[in-house]
Amino acid sequence: MNFREALQYLDRFINREATAGRIHGLSLAAMSELVECMGEPHKDLRTIHVTGTNGKGSVVSMTESLLSSKGLRVGSYMSPHVDTIRERFTLAGSQITEEIFSEIIFDVSQYVESHELEPSYFELLTAAAILLFSNEGVDAAVVEVGILGRFDATNVLEGEVAVITNIGKDHTDGSEGWRRSIAAEKAGIIVKGKPLLLG
């Protein structure tokens, strides 16, 4: 599978990022099934999990830089991308190459096809990030939530640290009680007994 073929493969899957804006009807079932079929590589990762409305990408980048400066091998996963899908994945501070991207999408596609799974576009990319970071043996993975938190595909990861930046009206209709609703969704990444940072 080359880079163009990897992109074409991804385009076969529902892209909920393109139609974000709903809280109801989300589930971790498909993502949980996918990582289980992959041998649960997510359990090998030490993760810093970042959610919020604004500033998530900056927090991920700063955290990755700080950990790298301490001599750790760090991977990061962010969304969405602006120019190239490879922006979502970094290893040791650099975007992954087209070749690495294609290889990891191919690897995930083998699990998807052999088990007849139907993940979304984002779930497939998240699985690719998890497999990449596990294969590379990173010391830490800094991972940005895609949509909200509680039922986001990244929430199969049990973060060593949860980070919640400020929250806003994204993914709401702005009706009364939106703050409580969004806060509950974002709080879904908190792991009992693990540190939580609020910004």
Image: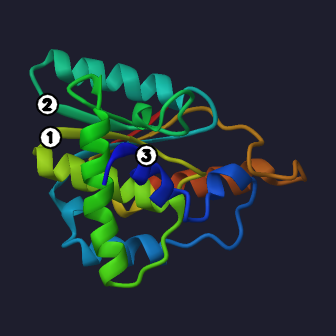
Mark before the other along the chain sequence, 3 or 1: 3
Single out the residue that lies furthest toward the top: 69
Q: Is residue 172 at least partly visible in the picture?
A: yes
Residues at marks 3 and 1, CA–CA distance in whole angstroms = 27 Å
The tally of labels here is 3
Q: How is the image coloured?
A: rainbow
Label 3 crowding class (10 Å Cα cut-off): few <14, some 14-19, many 20+?
A: few
Residue 150 location (% of width, % of height)? 53, 61
Q: Which residue is mark 2?
A: 73
| Secondary element at image label 3 | helix
Are the residues at dot 2 and dot 1 in contact (C-beta closer than 8 Å)? yes
| Secondary element at image label 1 | loop
**Front one among 89 and 178:** 89
Q: Which mark is residue 46?
A: none
Mark before the other along the chain sequence, 3 or 2: 3
Measuring 41% from the left and 53% from the top, which residue is drawn there? 5
Q: Which residue is mark 3?
A: 4
Mark 3 vs mark 1: in front: 3
Q: Which residue is mark 1?
A: 138
Q: Is residue 159 at least partly visible in the picture?
A: no
Are the residues at dot 3 and dot 2 in contact (C-beta closer than 8 Å)? no
Q: Is residue 39 above or below residue 105?
A: below
Q: Quadrant of the N terminus?
A: bottom left
